[in-house]
Image: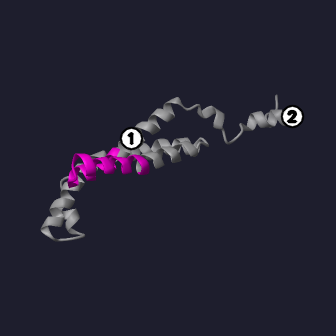
């Protein structure tokens, strides 16, 4: 994407100014897509472990609340140019990745077990499927 940015943007619009800005945005934002991968993987792990509330709150607070505050501060107090505004996306991804990783490292996932172990369930009911020889 970094090398062929102008060609990729020209698929959508051939105007020189659009291609220049689109290429610039692709080149600035695409290296940060690794944070999207981290977000999706660790949020998926937490959801799979039965904890869907924490990833939802982390993502909403990062992608909506943080990004809106970032854009307000950036546009009104720091720089109302395209690069700092466009970097709101990677900034949200970075915040979300950091919060998700911190939560994942400190969460006790053993308490949110969705499926009982078949052996323990069988032993509890007195019907063990494994027969002693």
**Residue 94 vs residue 80: left or right?**
right
Query: Which residue sits furthest right?
Result: 126
Q: Which residues are magenta?
A: 64-91
Q: Is residue 84 left or right of residue 56?
A: left
| Residue positioned 63% across, 32% down in the render | 110
Instruction: Say which element carries label 2.
Output: loop
What residue does disc 2 label? 126
Please tell me how many numbered marks the rendered image carries.
2
Q: In the visual, does 85 lie left or right of 41?
A: left
Residue ID for mark 1: 95
Q: Which of disc 1 and disc 2 is earlier in sequence?
A: 1
| Residue depicted at x 87% and y 34% | 126
Q: Residue at x 59, y 41 (%)?
A: 49
Marker disc for residue 130: none
Residue placed most toward the observer, 2 or 78: 78
Could you say where residue 66 lies in the image, as x and y percent from the top left?
39, 46
- Determine crowd level at label 2: few under 14, some 14-19, many 20+ residues with C-alpha closer than 10 A: few
Q: Main secondary structure of the magenta part?
A: helix
Asked if one can make out residue 101 in the rendered structure from this viewpoint, the answer is: yes
Can residue 133 be seen by looking at this rendering?
no
Residue ID at (65%, 33%): 111
Tell me how far mark 2 sits from mark 1, CA to CA: 50 Å
Whole-percent x, y for residue 36 in the image: 38, 47
Nearer the observer, disc 2 or disc 1?
A: 1
- Tell me the crowding category of disc 1: few under 14, some 14 to 19, or many 20 or more residues within 10 angstroms, Cα based: many
Say what secondary structure mark 1 lies in: helix
Q: Position of residue 41 (x, y in %)?
A: 46, 44
Residue 30 vs 109, above or below: the answer is below
Q: Is residue 120 magenta?
A: no
Magenta segment includes 72 = yes
Residue 128 x/y as whole percent: 82, 35
């Amino acid at each position: 994407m970094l090398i062929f940015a102008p060609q990729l943007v020209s698929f959508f619009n051939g105007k020189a100014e659009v291609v220049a800005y689109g290429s610039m945005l692709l080149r600035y934002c695409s290296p940060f897509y690794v944070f999207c991968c981290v977000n999706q993987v660790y949020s998926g792990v937490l959801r799979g472990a039965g904890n869907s509330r924490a990833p939802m709150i982390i993502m909403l607070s990062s992608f909506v609340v943080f990004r809106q505050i970032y854009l307000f501060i950036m546009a009104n107090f720091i720089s109302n140019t395209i690069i700092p505004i466009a970097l709101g996306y990677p900034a949200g991804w970075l915040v979300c990745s950091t919060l998700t990783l911190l939560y994942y490292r400190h969460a006790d996932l053993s308490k949110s077990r969705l499926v009982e172990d078949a052996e323990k369930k069988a032993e509890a009911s007195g019907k063990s499927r494994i027969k002693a020889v």
